[in-house]
Amino acid sequence: MGKHVLLIEDEPNIIEAIRFILSRDGWEVDTHANGQDAVELVRRKSPDLVILDVMLPGKSGYDILRELRSDPGSEGLPVLMLTARGQAKDRELAERIGASRFMTKPFSNADMLDAVRDLVSA
Amino acid sequence: MSREPLTGSRIRERRGIAGLRQVDLARSVGISASYLNLIEHNRRRIGGKLLLQIAEALEVEPALLSEGAEARVVAALREAAADRADAAAELDRIDEFAGRFPGWARLLAELQGRGVALEQIVETLTDRLAHDPHLAASLHEVLSTVTAIRSTAAILSDTAGLEPEWRDRFQRNIREDSKRLAESVQGLVTYLDNAGDAGSGATSPQEEIERHHAEHGYHVPSLEPGGDGDPAEIASGLGSATARFAMERHLRRYRSDAAAMPLEPALDQVARTGLDPLAFARAFGTDCAAAMRRLAALPQDRMPGPLGAVICDASGTLTFRRPVEGFALPRFGAACPFWPLFQALSRPQVPLSVPVAQAGRDGGRFRAYAVAQPVLAADFNADPLLEATMLLVPEEIAVQTGDHGDGATVRQVGPACRICPQPSCPARREPSILADGF
């Protein structure tokens, strides 16, 4: 299994921290900060894993996930959703539309690494 | 609680205390004993003059017999008993209780009132956390910053042999983020301070009306054709004069809309043409705005999906709001000028159908139908007074029920400037707290 991750998140310092942690763990990390063309970028980069923030400028993470799941090319792609709201309702929605995993901000670096490793080895 | 039942019982009670027979009291005030009997059993209303005479004959203050504070106490006791039916309070002996233990009864009534008031405050506070977009956005900002700080701090402390360039960079990030966090938190505290106490917030006319709608729904069965509801009476339950006025106005219009588009035919029509207001208006021969109002007033459990509605007058002031998840309606301040609602005002009488997406967290895709129409028949040589109405139907529901749109591009709209993330917007009138603001 490859170790190419695409991080879609709009908070620059979160991007920097995650990129650092994952790079040190041997991942190739691409980042993207806009929701609008995120789906197209996933198609082009074909990563092994997508880390997707729910709240993005241009398009919500939920909509992006819906589009990814309706495309045969990405319906099985592991997607880790990040959100600043840990309400049951958000989690349910994420699960319903096909998130592989759901993580609430603020998360610890160890949790992030575990989640990412799990998702790709699964 | 009406006053009569109580007054009759009290007369009977006082007559007993005075040791008078029914027939004697009746004679002394010039009525028949059987009529007094009816009054005492609360089967006849008792007028002012007769009440005064009876009070005089019984040698008590008339106020003792009439309603006043006591009736309010009994009403509150009834309310308390209804709220806590499990306690099985002896409702049939409520007058006896209030009469024999007036102090305890008052205390209980006061506690009931206090309980209700506190419940309302709690409800408002809960509502704030869930629906106040400003508060939600501020908390989101705080959580994002905390996430960055936590992650960065862990890198700094846990990475053995971190290169100096990286160390400097992460230290700088932490410095920036902690400054931002301090500012966000300060802004949040200021906002919460200024928001005042929940009690006063809960009584703003708009919130009162919204609470009423949230409790009772937007469908009012008693105002449907054949129902015996009265707009003024329903509106009289609201606290402030402004809220009562707006509510009564809304309900009067509700009643005439319901008469023009009766419930069952309206629901049949929805089953046939979905939530398309124009098809609905054609079917009933009404105007498009009336059709939108009616669609927003049909019972939610019999509709194909959720929908929202807003009405504004020609000044852009929102006069009716029915929120729908995924499309934030500003709680205070003005809305986004890109809403089709406002566009409709500049194209009177032209019904618009525009696919919209609300920018920002939780923003959903909707079909917005909007139209501006004169509210009054224009006078000679007078400009019409316009009112705009907008119906918001979730895109998937619009498509499901047969309206596939005409492929127009989706328009990005905001909730309100303050919480809108659009970075460059020609209509921006204040900085966003989501970007560099605060």
Image (cartoon, coloured by chain):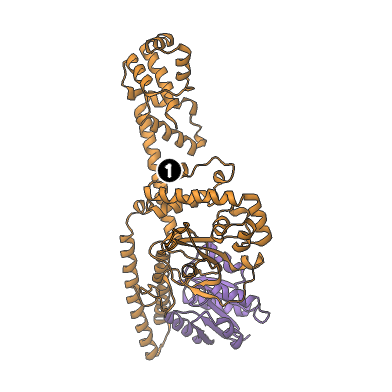
Task: Chain A: give its colour.
Answer: purple
User: Residue B179: where, in percent of width, then height?
Assistant: 32, 76
Q: Disc 1 designates what residue?
A: B236
Which residue: 55% across, 82% down? Answer: A38
* Rendered image quadrant of residue B330: bottom left
Quarter of the figure with the C terminus of chain A: bottom right
Q: Is residue B311 above or below residue B36?
A: below
User: Residue B423: where, in percent of width, then height?
Assistant: 42, 79
Front in this rendered view, residue B326 or B219 = B219
Task: Chain B: give its colour.
Answer: orange
* Rendered image quadrant of residue A49: bottom right
Front in this rendered view, residue B32 or B207 = B32
Residue type of the residue flagged with mark 1:
Ser
Side (left or right) of B119 relative to A42: left
On what subunit does the disc labeled 1 rest? Answer: B
Which residue: 61% across, 50% down? Answer: B262
Residue B142 seen in render: no
User: Residue B29: where, in percent of width, then height?
Assistant: 38, 13
User: Residue A47: where, in percent of width, then height?
Assistant: 59, 85
Residue B95 seen in render: yes
Side (left or right) of B163 relative to B289: left
User: In what element is the residue under mark 1?
Assistant: loop
Q: Is residue B376 above or below residue B172?
A: above
Residue projecting furthest to the front = B380
